[in-house]
Image (cartoon, helix red, strand yellow):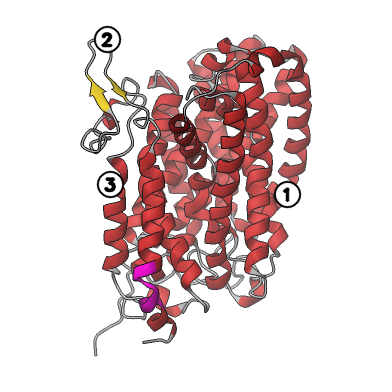
Amino acid sequence: MTPPDRSTAPLPSAAVGGAGVIETTGIEIIAEAERTARPRDLVWPWFAANVSVFGMSYGSYLLGFGISFLQATIVAVVGIVISFLLCGLVAIAGKRGSAPTMVLSRAAFGVHGQKVPGIVSWLTSIGWETSLAISAVLATATVFDVLGLASGQAVTVIAAILIAALIVTASVLGYHTIMKLQSVLTWATGAMTIVFMILTIPHIQWSAVASMPHGSPQAMVGALVMVMTGFGLGWINIAADWSRYQKRSASDGSIVLWNTIGGAAAPVVLVTFGLLLAGSDEGLAGAIENDPIGALVTILPLWALIPFWIVAVLTLVSGAVLGIYSSGLTLISLGIRIPRPAAAAVDGLILTAGTIWVAFFATSFIGPFQSFLITLGVPIAAWAGILIADVLSRRADYDEKALFDPAGRYGSVDWASVLTMVVASVLGWGLVVNSFADAAPWNNWQGYLLEPLGLGTFVDDPAGAYWDGNWAYSNLGVLLALVLGFVVTFVARREKIRRQERGA
């Protein structure tokens, strides 16, 4: 008799399950007795993680595409809402399968085939949480310098260590602690953010905002892709992690609704307000490139800096906590057999190292950040399209045991899904370009399909190479990967999904 393959088997649960001070549950199935969450509870983690004042800085990023305030507002509302709606669709899988996102994705990719998108997901989460921690460190250094309290490298190092410690501690404690913290942070940080917005209203110049010229439709598409990858698509690979404690009786529609409201409500307001600020002051818009939060500090009265700093750090930390928690689960799902708290701690060490490196050695923050977003955004979009099509095609709950058994109904590798993701990613990378060639030269290989398709021309100017053409900077590759992954899966795998649900 062939021994069972335990390479992907979940770690044993502690006797207390996941409800103790430290959550012991890793990637295993949540026990029915512990599934007590309600759909509206999803508001807390998503709202607290996205109420960050960092969202205001997207006003500058969107206007950088050369579009007007009206166009940017439309792009922001549509992109943010749709991207979090997609997160809500993925969250349905968490309710149906009671397991983390990257474990549930095995139903589409196979138990071992899932490691392909799993690695991309882990890198994405690590990058996101590091970028949020960096923003918090830069904000700390700026506020302390403005107030004359301290300055120099010592402040940066201490801030990086303390902020990383906050993130890792909450992540190690786990789901139940995080949900309680996020429910408190939602009200506290939300209220304070409104106060800061009121304080900065005098800086808005309505005439300057209204006089901004309209940009091309292609520029709007590029801005739309950026806002989608910067918000919902940046979280989509962890969406089911927060719905796996939902009651099995919860309706799919309610999960999608509350996930979307929780994620989109704050960013829609913050980005729109950020557009007003950036459109009123070109100097502020330019300063956001190197230090998003620090730039906003400059327009606040002196007495508000400490409260602003506290709120900014807490909101950024709350977002990073979600990332660290989920990246730890993803690490375990890849076959790294360590307890969940240890996995969160490992990712915390990586976050700390990355934060210190960027804070000291990176000359620009937004360049590498946006380049990173688009590069990993392409395969994540392809994976999301595949998983969403898989979720919408299913009529029954997952076979939970089969998610951990390569010999089960989901198989070891689903080559159709793996190849769809690879092909969609390759095509997608050919239709995106690195807008920050100097800050992130390692990404200049992208855009190889633009010239053959007549969508852009590469100009090797001695003063600085650039792409010429209306579609060159629209980042069509992200949308192509998302749509292609969805359509191919929805059409080609429907019969296979039916066979899986029949147990064949």
Quick one: label 3, few (<14), some, or many (20+) residues within 10 Å?
many
Residue sitting at x 55%, y 54%: 87
Indicate whether 314 appears above or below 233. Answer: above
Of marks 3 and 2, which one's residue comes earlier in the chain?
3
Please, what is the three-letter code of the amino acid marked with disc 3? Answer: Leu
Q: Do tag 1 and tag 3 residues touch (Cβ < 8 Å)? A: no
In the rendered structure, which segment of residues is drawn in magenta? 491-497
Estimate the x, y position of residue 226 in percent, counting from the top left: 47, 36
Q: CA distance from mark 3 to mark 2?
A: 30 Å
Q: Residue 463: give its label.
A: 2
Q: Residue 183: give its label.
A: 1
Residue 309 lies in the magenta stretch: no
Indicate whether 210 appears above or below 37. Answer: above
Q: CA distance from mark 1 to mark 3?
A: 41 Å
Between tags 1 and 3, which lies in front?
3
Indicate whether 71 appears above or below 499. Answer: above
Estimate the x, y position of residue 11 in percent, counting from the top left: 44, 69
Please, what is the three-letter code of the amino acid marked with disc 1? Answer: Ser
Of marks 1 and 3, which one's residue comes earlier in the chain?
1
